[in-house]
Amino acid sequence: MPVGNVTIGGGAPVVIQSMTNTDTADIEGTLQQVYMLAEAGCEVARIAAVDENSVKQIGIIKRYSPLPLVADVQFDYRLALLSIEEGVDKVRINPGNIGGEDKLKKVALTAKDRGIPIRIGVNTGSISTEMLKKYGGPTAGALVESALRTVDCLERCSFYDMIVSLKASSVTATVEAYEEISSRIPYPLHLGVTEAGKGWKGIIKSSVGIGSLLLRGIGDTIRVSLTGDPLEEIYAARDILQASEVRYFGPDIVSCPTCSRATIDVSGLVDRVEEMVKDIDCPVKIAVMGCPVNGPGEARHADIGISGGEGFGIVFKEGKVTKKVNLENLCAVLETEIREIVSAKEG
Ligand code: SF4
């Protein structure tokens, strides 16, 4: 399904999204953040359509945006209509607050006319009172039924360009809801754990929720919702996708946790290797291990690795020692070997 020049679903690579947290009316500031997100690896950006004025700003931002833009609409369906007129690439509506079916139909018909998709963004924080009563709270069942009702309404308008999300702040409710809906509808799914929190805690919640779904083959686009700088969302999203082995953005550096057998500064070496391979986007696996006792064997799945020896460093490939080098030359030798492997892989 096209969202601007990006494809979501249908076997396309899982797309990374984020949302600006600037004042939408601040065109320059918002556009600057969109550019920073794009630079970090974001592929689709969402912007809050707060009122009529901000929707007009989104129209201007869209003209200069390096990324497809999604208007995030809450409560007022007219803002969705205006956003579509302003040329956004997708609108996100919240079925819990967009109003009745007649309003939803107007949005669907306008989106259909302009050929853009709609995301049905169900959220535990805004589930209808009826659903809360029926399910006894914001459960996975309530999320799924809320989404299915909206899907049904759009289908009755012969509108099928939809993407669905069912976000809860509970990881288990999120996973349960996505598992259920993935077996009920054919539309692409936008994954995320809502209100995941700040920093480590938010990243861990998102990783567990999004990662476990990706490992089940569920999900077409993701957003890691974090309190703070949205660039952190992109770094986390890339690492989640790479750890789940659904997309690769560069080398995978594995390293041992170290123990009393370590004969080198593993932590310092990992920092140096990370810096050294920043420019490489080939999925080469590099191991940094503390000692020759277990290092090469434990990291036998790596394309290339180093470990400490007794006063020297060891270079190994696929579990076999290939070189012994002075510790001061270890990083330089590793870099040469990595770049040879990358050249060979890239043909
Ligand atoms: Fe300890 Fe060596 Fe294993 Fe690292 S590789 S954890 S130093 S035994």
Image: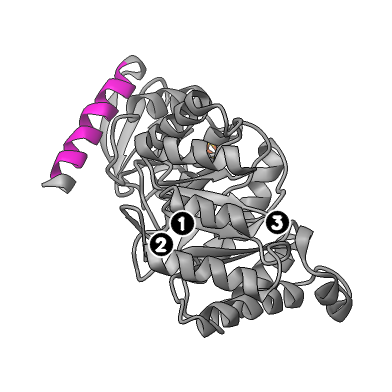
Q: Position of residue 334 (x, y in %)?
A: 28, 29
Secondary structure under badge 2?
loop
Disc on the earlier residue, 1 or 2: 1
* Rendered residue at 45%/64% (across/down): 111
* Rendered residue at 58%/38% (across/down): 54
* Residue that badge 1 annotates: 90
Disc 3 residue crowd, few under 14, some 14–19, many 20+, Cα 10 Å = some
Q: Alpha-carbon distance for marks 3 and 2?
A: 20 Å
Picture quarter containing residue 287?
top left
For the residue pair 3 and 229, the one nearer the viewer reads as 3
For the residue pair 182 and 206, the one nearer the viewer reads as 182
* Residue that badge 3 annotates: 75
* Residue that badge 2 annotates: 116
Q: Alpha-carbon distance for marks 1 and 2?
A: 6 Å
For the residue pair 237 and 141, the one nearer the viewer reads as 141
Q: For the residues labelled 1 and 2, say whether their Cβ atoms are less than 8 Å apart.
A: yes
Type of amino acid at the residue the image marks with label 3: Phe
Picture quarter containing residue 281?
top left
* Rendered residue at 52%/52% (across/down): 82
For the residue pair 1 and 73, the one nearer the viewer reads as 73
Type of amino acid at the residue the image marks with label 1: Lys
Q: Position of residue 75 (x, y in %)?
A: 70, 56
Magenta range is: 329-344
